[in-house]
Amino acid sequence: MEDVAAILGKTASPVIPTVAVVRCGGSCELRPRINQFNGASSCAIVHNLYGGDTGCSWGCIGLGDCVEPCKFDAIKLNPKTLLPEINDLKCTSCNACVTACPKGIIELRNLGVPAHKIYVNCVAKDPAVADACSVACIGCEKCVEVCQDKAITMIGKLAYIDPEACTLCGKCINVCPTNAIVEEKGTNPSPKGE
């Protein structure tokens, strides 16, 4: 980017690398199926017809609408958990999976150095969903109280960690009673051509 900017007589602004994350930890064992949809295999269709096959109407439907639009082979549906998994090394933050998810559970987050991110792995806006998913955010606000960086806010009864303000201290992980806050460490993607 700096080389292109120099040719154009411009200045390249530094860009913080981002990567897609799936904000749902409700695997099959943690968020049991309560019914089965026998129609078209599409998250968008299921989302528009009803809440999904589990008691959590906010979580991942698990039919893989996010996989198809990824042209970089960076997202796969885990056949055991029925949750999408993102490969940080292949993800280009193109936003295709974010746009394809009808539940809005995929978002782009800052990728720390080394590759490191902490986020609330739940988008349910009703703490009663804890009856359907054992790793749901219950809105207890313990994470907000322990965060010295003021990186965690409550959106209704759902905690949200601002990736710009989070210093990755991990204190919130230790106080979360449902393990809804996760930490992922990995390898930073290499710049193109390396």
Image (cartoon, rainbow, N blue to C red):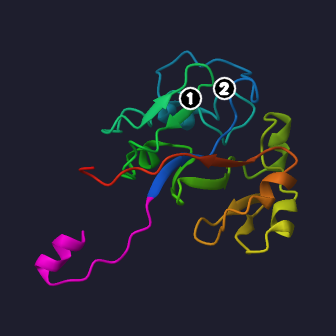
Taking the spot 73% from the left edge, 63% from the top edge, the residue there is: 169
Circle on res. 53: 2
Q: Residue 114 or 136: which is nearer the viewer?
A: 114
On screen, residue 88 versus residue 123, left or right, reads: left
Taking the spot 66% from the left edge, 54% from the top edge, the residue there is: 119
- Judge whether residue 142 is colored magenta: no
Decide which of tag 2 and tag 1 comes sooner along the chain.
2
**Marks 2 and 1 in Cβ contact (< 8 Å):** yes
| Residue 57 x, y percent position in the rendering | 68, 38
Question: Residue 106, relative to residue 13: is it above or below?
Answer: above
Q: Residue 80 or 190: which is nearer the viewer?
A: 190
| Residue 107 x, y percent position in the rendering | 52, 53
| Residue 51 x, y percent position in the rendering | 65, 35
Circle on res. 62: 1
The range drawn in magenta is: 1-17
Q: Residue 115 or 164: which is nearer the viewer?
A: 115
